[in-house]
Amino acid sequence: MKRIYSTDVKELEDGERCRLGGWLQEVKNLGGIAFFKVRDRKGVFQVVLVKKEVGDEFDELVNIPRESVVEIEGKKQITDQTELGYEILPTSVKVDSFAEKPLPLGVIDKVDAEMDTRFDNRFLDIRKNKKKLIFELRNILLEGIRDFFQKEGFIEIHTPKIVAAGAEGGATLFNVDYYGKEAYLAQSPQLFKQMLMSGGLERVYEIAPAYRAEDFDTVRHTSEFISLDFEMSFIDSSDDIMSMTSYLIEHSLKHVIRKGSDKLDKLGVEVMVPEHPIKKIPHYECIEILEDLGKKWEGEKSVDTEGEKILGEYVKENYDTDFFFITEFPTHLKKNTFYAMRKDYDPSVTTYFDLEYKGQELVSGGQREHRYDVLIKQMKELELKPEDFKSYLKSFKYGMPPHGGIGLGLDRFVQQLLGLNNIREAILFPRDTSRLEP
């Protein structure tokens, strides 16, 4: 008999036979009768054990430890004694795996454990319904993202994660011994995306790991994260990239609402879809707004973490949206991105932008510099050696179209979408300065 899920039982007739399996969540022994609550991926079902029918096995069955894996064969019985409207009368109960006692982490306990305990026992933590819902919604979000790119004619790519040079400077690179040669874990697929514009693919996207060896301990950073990147050719300006980004956000959020509304309800999350086009605020204007709101700086006036939060609240209150672009970044604030195109009429300003979501940077991107001579000049200004980027630069010598794109932190997108306090909640097995296991 094929195993079915708890949600499939609703479709069965009263008395129809079935086979289910899952984790034993709770045992309630009333002496002559006992009730099992068993959890599978899609829900919980109840099994009724009657001692006079089960016989000598009854005492053994009611002592099965919580979170053991069991398989139940039996028949559906319609009843008004449970919220489900049915229960399972078993003909056989098989224990696939006994759980040890005590559990290192409670699964249905109302009091949550410390974060370190939870992540040390992540396999148990994600058995909790609310934790599982995070990753089900993450999957729906990814489905919506890929659906958008396919409809817009993008090609999904996979670029190397072991590289010879960093896209954004060496300070945050993880070193790798590559057959005796020095190599690094990729910070981003940036250089490869641009090379593929020269290759004629014109529209590409990638969803893959990226790595930053930054010494931090914040609720919004990890050392390994999933980066969503796209690049597109024959653009007129960064406005084309911001427009595509706006439609991407709109499409993916609508997809989450359409396919995950029941899951959002269970988490108490309301999703606001931005109207197109998403509002744009130049960096200098952001500084003026922050000054009017009383922000003080020690040194450089830039939109820092505190400033992002203040601006997010300001835009929400005045424009009723969770999203806005910060545009026209000063060149010296984007100093690591040697490939960023600068304004022809004012080289002190780039064509780059950030997309803010609920007071946090979600996206960074813009138009890239496709002119070989200008690219070399900008490299030298940043004291980079062009000879370290030979393969990359070669693609600019033989026909490179105007192009641009973005990098979006998927984990942060999930964090902000679901209102999670810590980005690690959006990652199955997070990596940071103190965690390398599990």
Image: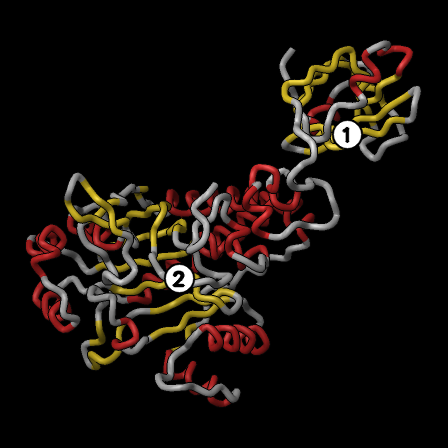
Q: Position of residue 293 (x, y in %)?
A: 52, 87
Q: Residue at x 20, y 48 (%)?
A: 183
Distance from disc 1 to disc 2, alpha carbons, whole Å, reads: 44 Å
The residue carrying pointer 2 sits among few (fewer than 14), some (14 to 19) or many (20 or more) residues within 10 Å by Cα, namely: many
> SS of the residue at dot 1?
strand
Left or right of residue 193: residue 383: left
Left or right of residue 26: residue 410: left
Q: Residue at x 29, y 52 (%)?
A: 174
- Amino acid bearing label 1: Lys
- Amino acid bearing label 2: Val
**Residue closer to the observer: 395 or 51:** 51
Q: Quadrant of residue 404?
A: bottom left
| Sooner in the amino-acid sequence: mark 1 or mark 2 | 1
Residue for badge 2: 363
Please identify, in this view, whether the residue under mark 1 or under mark 2 is nearer the observer.
Answer: 1
Name the quadrant of the N terminus: top right
**Residue closer to the observer: 312 or 426:** 426
> SS of the residue at dot 2?
strand
